[in-house]
Every structure is written in C-alpha cells, then in structure tokens.
Amino acid sequence: MQIYQNPKFITVTYFEKPKHILFDWVKLAIPLEDLKTLHMKAYEVAVEKKVKTLIAETSKVTDVLFQECIEWFGKDHVPRLAAGGVSRIITVVPKTALGRLTTKSWQGAVQGIEIHEVATLDDAIKLVVE
C-alpha cells in the first residue's frame, strides 16, 4: 500500500508480509515540511498496522539531508516512533561517500530504536521483526 510519493525524492510503501514500511529514497535534500508530512503519514500507518520495522533504502542517493531535517527526525520524530511501537530502523547504505556521511549524521541523532545497516534491500528484509 503506497503511503506517500514524491518522485523527485521518495516513495513510502507499507508491506504486510513481512510487515514493514519501506522508505525508498532517490534524493535526500527534501524540504523539512515535506519530510514531516511523509513521516507523519508513515507513522499513522505504523501505529494502525503495528509495524515494528522501518527500512530506509538509501543506496541510490548521492546528496545530503538538511541539518534541520536531521534534528527534527532525531529529537522529535524518533521518540514518537518508539512510543508508537517502532523498534528497528534498517538502512540500505548509500554507495557514495557523501550519501554514507549523511546516513551517519541522521543515525547519530537516533536514540531508543535499534539501527542496522545492510548492503542490499534483500538483506534488510531478512532483518524485519514482526
């Protein structure tokens, strides 16, 4: 079930088996308000469907996430996710050095949720907890 789509940046999809939400990133430099919108829509589905795992497919990105987005995600949204039942975020690591650097940035802002890094989406699916 598609939750959100902005072809320039991301598609967010809910999967029933195994139960997870996939954030398929094309470009990370998304405006903060758009980031909030997509994450709040995904949060609503995560709570409704009792999703424990989010997958960030970032292997294609070559840019960076804005600092204000990193701060909002880590300080405001991650505690909300944890309270809503999300326990794990799995990142398919970007192939570029710049992409990997920004991934480390937002991961460093996360507390209270397990963080895993994998090389492929198939590897991420194997780590989904239901």
Image: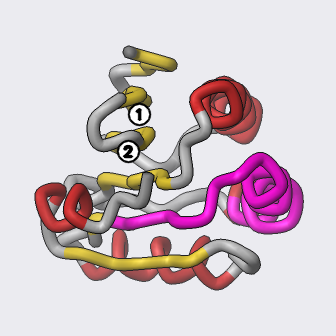
Which image quadrant for residue 2? top left
Sequence-first tag of 1 and 2: 1
Q: Where is 25 relative to 110, above or below?
A: above
Return the residue found at the far front. Answer: 130
Q: Nearer the viewer, residue 27 or 130?
A: 130
The Cα–Cα distance between marks 1 and 2, rounded to whole angstroms, is 5 Å
Label 2: state its secondary structure: loop
**Identity of the residue drawn at 28% across and 81% down:** 97
Q: Is residue 31 magenta?
A: no
Residue linked to disc 2: 27
Q: Where is 68 relative to 45, above or below?
A: below
Q: Nearer the viewer, residue 45 or 63?
A: 45
Could you say which disc has been placed on residue 9 in the image?
1
Residue 98, percent from left and from top: 35, 75
The crowd level at tag 2 (other Cα within 10 Å; few <14, some 14-19, many 20+) is some
Residue 15, percent from left and from top: 34, 30
Magenta region, residue range: 70-91
The crowd level at tag 1 (other Cα within 10 Å; few <14, some 14-19, many 20+) is some
Label 1: state its secondary structure: loop
Q: Main secondary structure of the magenta part?
A: helix
- The type of residue carrying mark 1 is Phe
**Identity of the residue drawn at 83% across and 55% down:** 83
Q: Nearer the viewer, residue 30 or 25?
A: 25
**Identity of the residue drawn at 64% across and 84% down:** 108
Q: Is residue 86 magenta?
A: yes
Marks 1,2: beta carbons within 8 A: yes
- The type of residue carrying mark 2 is Lys
Could you say which disc has been placed on residue 35 in the image?
none
Q: Where is 38 relative to 109, above or below?
A: above
Residue 44, percent from left and from top: 71, 26
